[in-house]
Image (spheres, helix red, strand yellow):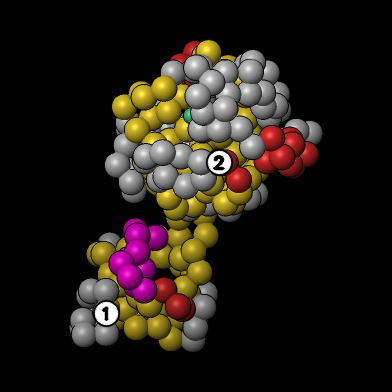
Amino acid sequence: MKRKLFSLFCAVLLTVGIFTPAGTPAEAATTYYVKVTTNSLNVRSGPGTTYAIVGSAKLGQSFKYLGVSGGWTKINFNGTSRYVSSTYVKKYSVSTLSTTSTAKMIIPTKGTLTQKYGPASGQYGYTFHNGIDLAAPRGTPVVSAAYGKVIVSRNYGAYGNHVMMSHQLNGQTYITVYAHLDRLNVVTGQTLAKGATIGTVGNTGNSFGNHLHFEVHRNSYVYSSSSPANSINPYTMF
Ligand SMILES: [Zn+2]
């Protein structure tokens, strides 16, 4: 993040400061599916009406989601990658929980560290950088650092498009922040596995160049432009 926008952080504080996640520490594997929402749906060999119809799906049938291509959704149809119109399917996720908990987080994007956590010059309006900046090309996937729940996913203020997640790791609550995203792929309330794609690297908000600004906070989200507040160095979590 570059620059301070105090009102933003007050607003964010109000939003997430008292959030307490439910449930027990767990790891989850998330799989995405689509459910057919029309009576009869053509299944095609490729993403478009010019491709051959190779089958038909019925209302309520579910298929494993494999991705999108324009207005077409790629599904696993009888073991083969096929396409259906995205208009007539609804995507949903299934998380499989296990009882094990992993204390560590993973680095949420492949990038180059361009600004460390710690004291800063003040040239961007803050004298303490409460996260790390990882520069990467626009569109590079950003993933959840740990299993947890999405508590914020929106475009707002200095963070631009950003996601906040709440995690329970060995009985401790952590809040992670992923800022300046190009795309947001998750919505508030979703539960995500560690490593699930939440968005892509971008340059939104008060950002100068494509990068991910990533923060880790203990217990709740508290921001200060001049001290760590309750942020911690993300590298202590990896
Ligand atoms: Zn930053």
| Residue 173: quadrant of the picture | top right
237 lies above or below 210: above
| Kind of residue indicated by mark 2 | Tyr
Q: Secondary structure at mark 1?
A: loop
Q: Residue 125: which numbered mark, if any?
A: none
Query: Who is closer to the viewer here, 40 or 86?
Result: 86
Cα distance, mark 1 to mark 2?
A: 37 Å
| Residue 99: quadrant of the picture | top right
Q: Residue 48: which numbered mark, if any?
A: 1
Labels in figure, total: 2
Give coordinates of residue 158: x percent, y percent.
57, 41
Q: Residue at x 25, y 64 (%)?
A: 80
| Residue 166: quadrant of the picture | top right
| Kind of residue indicated by mark 1 | Gly
Q: Is residue 181 visible?
A: no
Q: Residue at x 63, y 18 (%)?
A: 226
Residue range in magenta is 65-74
